[in-house]
Amino acid sequence: MTPPSLNRRAALSGLALTGALTGLSGPAFAAKTTARRAVLDLRQATQPLDRFFDLSVGADFPGTTIRDANLAQLKEASDELGFRYMRFHNIFADDLGTVKRKEDKLVYDWTRVDYLYDAMLKSGIKPFVELGFTPDALKTSDQTIFYWKGNTCHPRPHQWKQIVDADTRQNI
């Protein structure tokens, strides 16, 4: 008997393949297309399948990922799918309280970042760290993107160097 997780994965893969083959994605959906049928026989494979896609997944940003319900769902997904790394945006997110400006000095607090990393590692997932987006304490403008308002301005280089250095020393 096939485990339910494999049935779901196979069904989703079939839907994605069907959509791609029939042109039912993006702007092509509006255009008239001719359906094509593809038959794949894995017994005919001539070389091993490169399973690079099993290694890593992407997530939203740490302000969402750190929630207990999200961490539980992440563990379940990792257990079922077997990925080993996860990448998300904005590890210096203000939601985590990582960096604040106090009396014109930068003050770091890695408590919530440590909690998130520890929860991921406990679930068998290694963080794939992205240093993108500028925390409020370092911003040079209010230019943002996404619903969680990731600041896209260029931070002051010396302050960015300080936070990256502090993060690296903390999380090695």
Image (tube, helix red, strand yellow):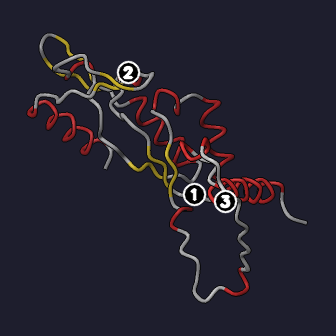
Q: Position of residue 166 (x, y in %)?
A: 22, 38
Mark with earlier residue (2, 1): 1
* Residue at the limit of the structure toward the front, as seen here: 32
Q: Which residue is mark 1?
A: 83
Q: Position of residue 120 (x, y in %)?
A: 53, 45
Q: Which residue is mark 3?
A: 17
Q: Please name the residue shown 72% across and 53% down the image.
A: 15
Residue 112 falls left or right of residue 151: right
Q: Amino acid at mark 1?
A: Phe
Q: Please name the residue shown 65% across and 85% down the image.
A: 45
Say if mark 3 contacts mark 1, CB within 8 Å.
no
Q: Amino acid at mark 3?
A: Leu
Q: CA distance from mark 3 to mark 1?
A: 21 Å
Q: CA distance from mark 3 to mark 2?
A: 34 Å
Q: Amino acid at mark 2?
A: Lys
Residue 143 falls left or right of residue 91: left
Q: Residues within 10 Å of mark 3 (few under 14, many from 20)?
A: few
Q: Please name the residue shown 50% across and 56% down the image.
A: 56
Q: Which residue is mark 2?
A: 149
Mark sitting on residue 20? none
Q: Residues within 10 Å of mark 1 (few under 14, many from 20)?
A: some
